[in-house]
Image (cartoon, rainbow, N blue to C red):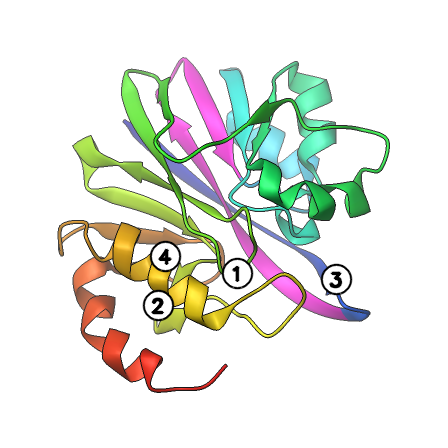
Amino acid sequence: MRLDRVVTSGIFSLDGQDFEVDNNVWLVGDDTEVVVIDAAHDAETILAGVADRRLKGILSTHGHNDHINAAVEVATTAGCPIFLHPDDAMLWDVVYPEHRFDTDLAHGDQLTVGGTELKVLHTPGHSPGGCCLHVPSQGIVFTGDTLFSGGPGATGRSFSSYDLILDSIEAHLFSLPSETTVHTGHGDSTSIGAESPSLSEWRSKQD
């Protein structure tokens, strides 16, 4: 498997507030074909990362604008579908009111690119349709904004739930092998083993 990361920068907007953010855009595949995980901010930079490979699809971990705001331009240029869990359709519609994403993601879906299988884990909490993408053969999980180095993704905003994100993390992420590498939507990577001992501490905190 070939794994590349592109870091793009832009604005995350929600509930009338704007935040400057750097996003990790992950490209998974081989030297022939690839998928993009979260087409954020800068279509030109993402397409440069794809280069001359076939882009099989854009896998959106959730529908917040900073994870999808380059998706349509990338997909239109490359001629590929956009995947998103339907529970985040209302977030998608804020960014693209006249352009529907192409394919629904669902828990347990399996997608193959360059001979590598990615398994969809529905992990609501940061948003209702939040998903992670597990690559069992490589011991990797892409967590979007569900789990970061040092804690769960942000809640306390529209459509989010602190209790639910912790339930999702416990059920679907901390059940993975402890050596699993966690590649996040923002910031540094971590591992399941590094984060799982903190669950009880996180549960003791209020949203």
How dense is the environment of label 4, judged by Cα within 10 Å: few (below 14), some, or many (20 and up)?
Answer: many
| Residue at the spot of label 2 | 149
Q: Position of residue 50 (x, y in %)?
A: 52, 26
Is residue 144 or residue 41 the one in the foreground?
144
Q: Nearer the viewer, mark 4 or mark 2?
A: 4
Q: Which residues are magenta?
A: 18-37
Say if 163 sits above or below 63 in the image.
below
**Who comes first in sequence, dot 2 or dot 1?**
1
Going by the numbered disc 3, the residue's amino acid type is Ser
Going by the numbered disc 4, the residue's amino acid type is Ser
How dense is the environment of label 2, judged by Cα within 10 Å: few (below 14), some, or many (20 and up)?
Answer: some
Q: Label 4 vs label 3: CA separation?
A: 24 Å
| Residue at the spot of label 4 | 168
Is residue 56 or residue 163 the one in the foreground?
163
Q: Label 2 vs label 3: CA separation?
A: 22 Å
**Who comes first in sequence, dot 4 or dot 1?**
1
Q: Position of residue 102 (x, y in %)?
A: 65, 22
Q: Secondary structure at mark 1?
A: loop
Residue occupying image coordinates x 43% and y 70%: 163
| Residue at the spot of label 1 | 126
Q: Position of residue 183 (x, y in %)?
A: 36, 51
Going by the numbered disc 1, the residue's amino acid type is His
How dense is the environment of label 1, judged by Cα within 10 Å: few (below 14), some, or many (20 and up)?
Answer: many
Residue occupying image coordinates x 73% and y 20%: 76
Residue occupying image coordinates x 22% and y 59%: 192
**Who comes first in sequence, dot 2 or dot 3?**
3
Say if 82 sits above or below 170 in the image.
above
Q: Label 3 vs label 1: CA separation?
A: 14 Å
| Residue at the spot of label 3 | 13
